[in-house]
Amino acid sequence: MREEEGRPTSASLGDMTSMPSRSGDAMDLDLIPNLSIHTSMSDDLSIDFSQRKSSISTYDTTRLSGEGSPMTMSPWCRNPNSTQSPWADYEIEHPDIPVKQLPHNVLIGSIVREEGHIYSLAASRDLLYTGSESKNIRVWKSLKEFSAFKSNSGLVKAIIICGDKIFTGHQDGKVRIWKASSKNPDVHKRSGTLPTFIDIFKCSIKPKNYVEVKRNKSSVWIKHNDAISSLSMNQEKGLLYSASWDKTFKVWRVENSKCLESVKAHEDAVNSIVAAENDMVFTGSADGSVKVWRREAQNKGTKHILLHTLLSQECAVTSLVIDESHSILYCGSSDGLVNFWECDEQLTHGGVLKGHKLAILCLVASGNLLFSGSADKTICVWKRLEGLAHSCLSVLTGHSGPVKCMAVEKDSDSSDIADQRWLLYSGSLDKSVKVWSVSEHSPDFSEIVNLTA
């Protein structure tokens, strides 16, 4: 959420009374600049959104998040302020229960650090990277702190990993590149910044390289002029995409750190960007639209051409993600709904998933599962069934603040091929990161009853 001249916004999230500032010192629901939330004195969060129903989804649209869910009273949904430390293991609470008999979706760990809100997560090869408003990027291995490195400026808004490089997007509009030392893997050093100082200097010499960014203010086109909200990578072409609140996305060649193109994509903040197959790119914005772009050859170079506008609505688009098979595009919005489309030539709208009371803040997908994190403090676990049908397997509860970011990877300790398990990491404005073990199978409710008896 943002406040700018000419953009009225109002928000209140229970006990979080401070409004976000552009410097990021206060609470920041950065993905939903146009969201208006109203709360009563009883701290009962609510938001008015249209009661759309999907003709495809098998989810019960009359049930709100957490209602009737076995996870609501789950013994694994621990108080994040617990003094147990810093990671609590499920087996400690239930030493007599073998790992293979754990419930399908269970909280296995939680960490709370006094470093402010968690804004970004990324997971790769058993390493978890966390970004917060402290400007620290912490690295976790086997649920223990492995390393840490710090940026001199700019809150960490986005993290992605490609090969041996870590890319971080910041509040100050810059992308920073990090690499682990070959001699000492727990030491990370900054290997570059986008745009580079020399490129900014060269670009600033020619007047034609300046564009108007605000009234009576101009800047060179290779620079973002507001916070970076999202990063995505086209690994095949070696291209990095950065989306920003300045209403643009930029394209970078990773090999030489050059900015190839800047696209004025939307009429409001660009909240999410996803690079897909066949040079396709999807962007979602606070202006309520989802747009489809394609990278095409033009003259001696390339340019991104607008192909379609998939969605145009009043509420902000907050998050986009493509499933592992690149067959479905999911879109989360500030009305708490998830729209999805088939990634075919027609980009056919597949339906709407409804499972949250408040805004969707983040989406991740892996295998046949989609995870949606929300301002209502819950995570819905969706499974894609045959065709375009989806089912909500469970609602994960335990955070005491909005779920701001997530990351997911295969559970390397899962040896049962018939029951693939995933490690889901969730970061929240309650300053905690939680780790969940999630299965693609539906929960066995009798098993849960026996464990809680």
Image (tube, rainbow, N blue to C red):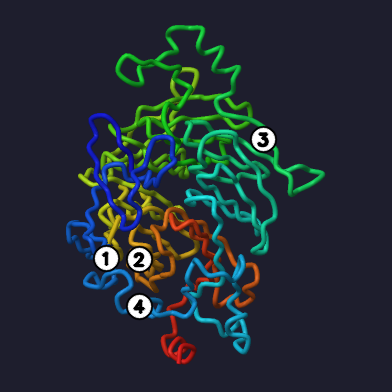
Q: Is any part of residue 218 visible from this angle?
A: yes
Pointer 2 residue: 387
Q: How many other residues sit within 10 Å of disc 3, few (<14), some (14-19) or many (≥20)?
A: some
Residue at (49%, 41%) from the top-left corner?
A: 231
- Check the image and name the residue furthest to the right: 183
The quadrant the N terminus occupies is top left
Q: Amino acid at mark 4?
A: Ser
Measured as percent of width and height from the top left, residue 126 is found at 65, 59
Compute the Cα span from label 2 to label 4: 26 Å
Q: Helix or strand or loop: what does disc 1 sit on?
A: loop
Q: Nearer the viewer, mark 3 or mark 2?
A: 3
In the picture of the structure, the residue carrying the numbered disc 3 is 190
> Which numbered tag is attached to residue 56?
1
Which residue is denoted by mark 4 in the rendering?
A: 69
Q: Residue drawn 60% across and 17% down?
A: 198
Compute the Cα span from label 1 to label 3. Answer: 47 Å
Instruction: Give me the C-alpha separation between circle 4 and circle 1.
Output: 22 Å
Circle 4: is it few (<14), some (14-19), or many (20+) Cα within 10 Å? some
For marks 3 and 4, give the CA distance: 45 Å
Chain-order first, disc 4 or disc 1: 1
Q: Position of residue 81 (x, y in %)?
A: 50, 66
State the image coordinates of residue 54 (x, y, percent, origin top left).
23, 63
Q: Residue, x 48% and y 22% (percent of image)? A: 222
Q: In terms of secondary structure, where does tag 4 sit? A: loop
Q: How many marks?
A: 4
Element carrying mark 2:
loop
Does residue 390 sit above or below 18 in this rendering? Answer: below
Taking 307 as reference, is 214 above or below it?
A: above
Quadrant location, the C terminus: bottom left
